[in-house]
């Protein structure tokens, strides 16, 4: 876990520390149990192939959770996530590295920071595209 | 006998319909299984010793757990393989694609909180796309804790074709 980040230290255009995830089938099963999403396309290879996929794919909301973790890892215990949103543009297969990235797009005052956040496959394809607003504490407080 | 396909007009009659409220108890094991599935080891979620020295005075529930609420609400219905955000609204077509979602966070949630969530169909549109006639359905949800405090507001868009 990184040191507490403060509003004053943040610059528009900067990229925040990224995360690398690698979803095994076991992780997708854990997610199914942890989230209540038992859709077979995420753990049943035959079912996935019946839907023209090579193998099972990562649940959209697991990716959304990775984006959430990207933010909470960065803002530290003094920060607050105000809003997060994303669009599921593409699918991500099981057993592949996934890069979770974010970039500051605006500092709006009162500690509020807007970001673009996204997930990427190893070849750079963006599979989830999103934005977020966080509130950072000030060094002065 | 052929069934008449639901039209945009049919679907617009459902705007304003809400799913029955869903109760989500944020027990310790629920949060533990969630953070383990995400592999999110932030000590703020599960380490009381760490968390009591922060401004929160104790552990809080990761806000991104609310990304799962829709799944749990939806899967609690008997609507088959692909569940829907508002189970008492029919799906006009067969296939469902997740569109866009947003979550707005208010009061932090704590282990032990009892969250009551409502979800309402707020808009239906039709668009012609590469998949043919596509129904764009927007559902908005609100989650409050046992003290009636707003915890999360979500907007979920699904594409049905």
Image: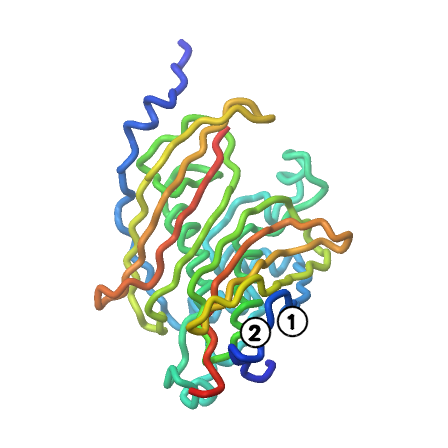
Q: Quadrant of residue A106?
A: bottom right
Residue A18: x %, y % from top left: 66, 68
Both marks 1 and 2 on one chain: yes
User: Disc 1 marks which residue?
Assistant: A17
Q: Are marks 1 and 2 in contact (CB under 8 Å)?
A: yes
Position of residue A6 measured from the top left corner of the image (x, y, whole percent): 52, 80
Residue reaching furthest front? A109
Q: Examine the rendering and report whether any part of residue B46 can be seen.
A: no
Chain where mark 1 sits: A
Q: Which residue appears farthest toward the left when viewing the image?
A: B147
Q: Which mark is residue A74?
A: 2
Chain on which label 2 sits? A
**Left or right relative to B151: residue B148:** left
Residue visible at 59% across and 43% down in the picture: A41
Q: Which of A56 and B113 is in front in this view?
A: B113
Quadrant assignment, res A19: bottom right
């Amino acid at each position: 876990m990184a040191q507490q980040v403060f509003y004053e230290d943040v610059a528009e255009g900067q990229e925040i520390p990224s995360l690398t995830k690698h979803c095994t089938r076991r992780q997708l099963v854990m997610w199914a149990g942890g989230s209540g999403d038992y859709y077979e396309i995420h753990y049943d290879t035959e079912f996935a192939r019946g839907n023209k996929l090579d193998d099972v794919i990562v649940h959209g909301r697991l990716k959304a959770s990775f984006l959430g973790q990207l933010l909470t890892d960065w803002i530290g215990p003094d920060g607050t996530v105000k809003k997060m949103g994303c669009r599921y543009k593409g699918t991500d297969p099981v057993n592949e590295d996934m890069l979770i990235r974010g970039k500051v797009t605006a500092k709006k005052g009162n500690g509020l920071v807007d970001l673009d956040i996204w997930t990427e496959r190893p070849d750079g394809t963006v599979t989830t595209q999103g934005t977020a607003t966080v509130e950072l504490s000030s060094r002065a407080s | 006998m052929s069934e008449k396909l639901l039209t945009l007009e049919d679907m617009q009659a459902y705007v304003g319909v809400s799913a029955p409220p869903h109760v989500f108890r944020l027990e310790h094991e629920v949060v533990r299984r969630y953070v383990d599935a995400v592999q999110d080891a932030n000590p703020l979620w599960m380490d009381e010793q760490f968390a009591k020295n922060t401004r929160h005075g104790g552990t809080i529930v990761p806000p991104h757990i609310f990304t799962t609420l829709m799944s749990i609400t939806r899967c609690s219905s008997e609507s088959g393989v692909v569940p829907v955000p508002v189970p008492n609204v029919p799906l006009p077509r067969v296939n469902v694609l997740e569109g866009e979602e947003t979550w707005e966070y208010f009061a932090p949630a704590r282990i032990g909180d009892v969250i009551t969530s409502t979800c309402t169909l707020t808009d239906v549109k039709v668009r012609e796309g590469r998949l043919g006639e596509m129904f764009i359905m927007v559902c908005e949800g609100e989650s409050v804790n046992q003290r009636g405090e707003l915890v999360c507001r979500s907007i979920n868009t699904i594409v049905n074709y």
